[in-house]
Image (spheres, grey):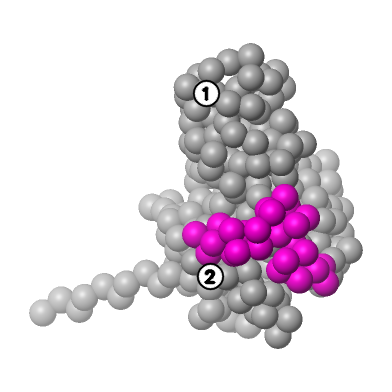
Amino acid sequence: MATPARPIPTYGLYGDEAPPDLDEFFHCETIAVRSQRYDWEISPHVHPALSQMLFVSAGTVELRLGLTERRLHGPVLVCAPRDIVHGFRFSADVVGYVVTVAQDFLDSLSRQDALRIQLGRAGIHPLSAAQSGRLTALGTQLVEAEQGRFDPNMHRLHRALAEAWLRTAIRPGIAAPDRLDTLAQRFQSLVERRYREHRPLSFYAEHLNCTVRTLTRQTEDAFGMTPLQIVNRRLLFEARRLLRFTNANCSEVAAELGFEDPSYFSRFYRRMTGHSPSAEKQRTDR
């Protein structure tokens, strides 16, 4: 009788039983930090809501990426999108970084964005010495910022460095640069300036000289979201930032975000996240 194949395990970060906080989630660590714990072998596994870039600047990696199995020498970049089986065996002298990004962040990018495209495809990409040097320099700064990413003053720096590292790793020519004058992108820019005002969609459409129907079609094509979803996601992101990284209480956060009634803010937050803003605050304070 054949022995049944063991199921492929699912993780947030490899070996961690608790799922990571996926809200605007970025994580960076050296390859050695995690793989050394497991005798330099990361067994095949999947991440349902995370994508990763593995950068090997020196040393050797034997990898499984989907159905592909390869032995590679650095410098090389490996893209592992969510839900793809991947595993690695490293040489003990390996040098490099693993940068992890939540699908929630990738979904906020336009479908033409080169970063979203690259992290949506499994791939193995040899790197030049110059590319490797840039990723190493940024990676050093990112790992340092990782230590303080829950500090209010470091949170924005960590996020900016993480996105900068990921964009530095994009292969040249993977996609045409986003045009900055598309209707969907002008809408996103307008939302950034006015989301606290709780304007109806007709306000945005009027300022962009289009109908709500056209605006909806354009944002769904570009981002896979309706205009209202984009506005609400922006409000939610700022609410989480204020609750987690400032001393403001829930009523003060509600007022800062333009909610006249704190109870309406609480209902909005619960509808978007499944828990109350006070529960978010208590979780952060622990």
Point out residue 6 in the picture as x, y percentages from the top left corner. 30, 75
Q: Is residue 111 left or right of residue 193?
A: left
Point out residue 75 in the picture as x, y percentages from the top left corner. 71, 50
Residue carrying label 2: 275
Q: Is residue 119 left or right of residue 258?
A: left
Q: Main secondary structure of the magenta part?
A: helix
Q: Secondary structure at mark 1?
A: helix
Point out residue 89 in the picture as x, y percentages from the top left corner. 55, 68
- The furthest residue to the front: 261
Label 1 Cα neighbours within 10 Å, binned few <14 / some 14-19 / many ≥20 = some
Look at label 1 and name its amino acid: Val
Of residue 116 and residue 273, the one placed in the foreground of this image is 273
Q: Is residue 270 left or right of residue 114?
A: left
- Image mark for residue 212: 1
| Residue lying at 66% horizontally and 50% vertically, measured from the top left | 235
- The furthest residue to the bottom: 286
| Residue lying at 53% horizontally and 42% vertically, measured from the top left | 229
Point out residue 63 in the picture as x, y percentages from the top left corner. 52, 60
Q: Earlier in the sequence, mark 1 or mark 2?
A: 1
Q: Secondary structure at mark 2?
A: loop
| Residue lying at 48% horizontally and 54% vertically, measured from the top left | 82
Is 261 inside the magenta-drawn segment?
yes
Q: Is residue 5 left or right of residue 190?
A: left
Of residue 187 and residue 50, the one placed in the foreground of this image is 187
